[in-house]
Image (cartoon, rainbow, N blue to C red):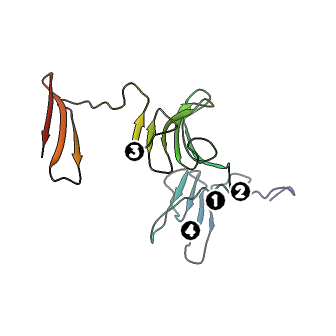
Amino acid sequence: SGNGTETVFNQNSVDLDFRVESDGNANMLFVDAGNNRVGVGTGSPATNLHVANVSGNTGLKLDSQSTSTGITSITFHNGGTGNPTGIIEVGGSGSSSNGIIFKHGNNGSEIERMVIDPSGNVGIGTASPQAAKFSSTASVILEVAGTKPVINVHETDVTDAEFSMGMSGGTALLGTTG
């Protein structure tokens, strides 16, 4: 049914599924009316939106058609105003343009927490990672916790060259090999 500006299926809220077939998939689009779920490529969606492909890779493409300042993003939000929000963003203009930006905060006040720039440099707490593959402006950039925490740095072009630092029984340990 419809009113001239829209088409409505199942306007009376009957528990009646809706299915669209493609040339090779009987459940190309499936609406599970009883569970309020949508399946793409599956006739038994397990979540609100379930995308499946039984014969290969499964993908979801979000594509901003703007050539200069368009931003493509995925937003994760739990609940109403003031609750935590996480955003993964690609594109736009600015210091991390065309990189991947990870934001976190409360609904409407998210800030950049981590950036992977187009060169592969990772910045935590900075939107402009320098030439190093990892840089941070935070006072604590790495915390390793556990009963006997250890950090190993291994040089890949020299056999068995390694630097280790850790803690054991309250004693700091430093060592090298190779």
In the rendered structure, which disc, 3 or 2, sits on the residue that comes first in sequence? 2
* Separation of residues labelled 3 and 4 (CA atoms): 44 Å
The 10 Å Cα crowd at callout 4, few under 14, some 14 to 19, many 20 or more, is: some
Q: Residue furthest bottom?
A: 23
Nearest-to-viewer mark from 2 and 4: 4
Kind of residue indicated by mark 3: Lys
Report the front residue among 15 and 145.
145
In the rendered structure, which disc, 2 or 4, sits on the residue that comes first in sequence? 2
**Residue placed under numbered mark 3 in the picture:** 133
* Separation of residues labelled 2 and 4 (CA atoms): 18 Å
Quarter of the image holding residue 164?
A: top left
User: Is disc 4 placed on a helix, strand or loop?
Assistant: loop
Residue 36 position (above or below residue 152): below
Q: Where is residue 20 in the image (x, y as percent from the top left)?
A: 63, 68
User: Is disc 3 placed on a helix, strand or loop?
Assistant: loop
Residue 19 position (above or below residue 166): below
- Which corner quadrant holds the N terminus? bottom right
Q: Where is residue 160 in the image (x, y as percent from the top left)?
A: 14, 50
> For residue 16, which numbered disc appears in the image?
1
* Separation of residues labelled 3 and 2 (CA atoms): 54 Å
* Separation of residues labelled 4 and 1 (CA atoms): 15 Å
Count the labels in the image: 4
In the rendered structure, which disc, 1 or 2, sits on the residue that comes first in sequence? 2
**Residue placed under numbered mark 2 in the picture:** 10
